[in-house]
Image: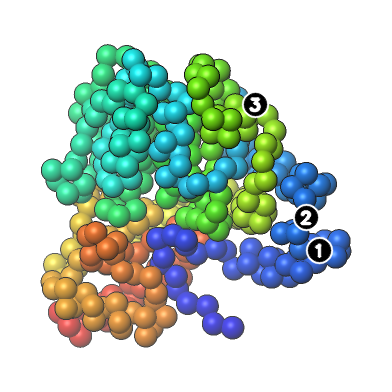
Amino acid sequence: MKRVHNFSAGPAAIPTEVLEIVRDELLDYRDTGTSIMEKSHRGKEYSEIDVQAKERLTRILGLQDDFHIMFLQGGASAQFMQVPMNFLDKDQTADYINTGVWSKKAIKEAKLFGKVHVPFSSEDEQFSRVSTKDELQLSDNPRYVHFTSNNTIYGTQYRVEPDSNGAPLICDASSDFLSREIDIDRYGLIYAGAQKNLGPSGVTVVIVRKNFLQTATKTDIPTILNYKTHAERIFNTPPTFAVYMVNLVLKWFEEKGGISYFEKLNDQKADLLYSAIDSDDFYRGTAQPNSRSKMNVTFRLPSEELEAKFLSKAAENDLVALKGHRSVGGIRASIYNACSLESVKALTDFMKHFRDKNG
């Protein structure tokens, strides 16, 4: 069996230990004679998985009994629509911080349901940074403040939550969920596609504060798009296999040491990679230093021809999925929780060798 150093932005690397469990249980889940994919979502086995995954997330994030956890479908893109559909009326204003493509998509959807105010945008700087503490120009009484915590395309990240002046924060945390400590008391709702740090594509985790959900009083919402439909029970068939894998990833996450362990590891990986980029001017980081992401490290080489050669030679050395997003080009190394320090060391060793040969 061959395993390469996988730097994919998503769907991304999944812990080998988890994949081995899935392999061993695929045909016969715990001596039941069927795969977990073949079992009823109302049955004992899947119900235990659903409960376990929610209990693990509650422990990891310190949620206590203040939040509902839901496993929904449609990715973060569906949440761009579902959040304002539930929480934003025509005569209300929500503040949306614009730090990239995904923020812009969320803004577009929100405008279908109510008023949108943009308190900060870095679009005129090619989305090379996030907002600083004091430059948000919030509206007078926002229904909520929405931000994207990590921007996969541009390699930027909020190190701490933006100041919402007391308004509930709503966060698209798809690409840095569970990578570092957060101030959970600041949030009304967090959503994250699983395919970065949590498991396979196909399921989206939505965590909503119970008293914030109680403020959602709109009645003209289709049943399946109403968060209250999913808050207390499994309403329709969930993506059972994806949730099963999320539960295994969360178990692996806790056994490794939880958020404190991965925050330290992610700091090590990012520091190592950014040091390689900054060692001279052959590699050039695209994000401003105080906004650099610890999940998606983006950089350029002196020419597009060298970038193509870099990608080709990297693949020959089992370093894969390093091509930047099609909209911006360049190189992107996604170093989520399941990307090992050894993989990052292999990449930085290759970068030094490539620079020595082509610099």
User: Mark 2 falls on what kind of element?
Assistant: loop
Q: Nearer the viewer, residue 346 or 58?
A: 58
Which of the labelled discs sits on residue 250, or is there none? none
User: In front of the other: label 3 or label 2?
Assistant: 2
Q: Circles 2 and 1: CB distance less than 8 Å? A: yes
Horizontally, is 254 left or right of 86 in the view? right
Instruction: Indicate whether 265 appears above or below 180.
Output: below
> How many residues crowd mark 2 within 10 Å: few (<14), some (14–19), many (20+)?
some
Provide residue 284's location: percent of width, then percent of height.
Answer: 18, 63
**Quarter-of-image position of residue 59:** top right
* Coordinates of residue 57 in the picture (x, y in percent): 61, 41
Q: Please state which of the two labelled residues, at mark 1 or mark 3, is closer to the viewer.
A: 1
Question: Counting residues from the N terminus, which is met first, the one under dot 1 or under dot 3?
Answer: 1
Identity of the amino acid at label 3?
Asp
> Circle 1 is placed at which residue position?
34
Q: Quadrant of residue 103?
A: top left
For label 2, the residue is 39
In the picture of the structure, the residue carrying the numbered disc 3 is: 65
According to the image, what is the colour scheme of the structure? rainbow
Tell me the kind of residue under disc 2.
Answer: Lys
Residue plotted at (46% across, 52% down): 264
Which is nearer the N-term, disc 3 or disc 2?
A: 2
Image quadrant containing the C terminus: bottom left
The correct choice, above or below, for 275 with respect to 306 in the image is: above
Say if residue 112 shows up in the picture: yes
Q: Position of residue 20 (x, y in %)?
A: 66, 69
Say whether disc 2 or disc 1 marks the residue closer to the N-terminus. 1
Secondary element type, mark 3: loop
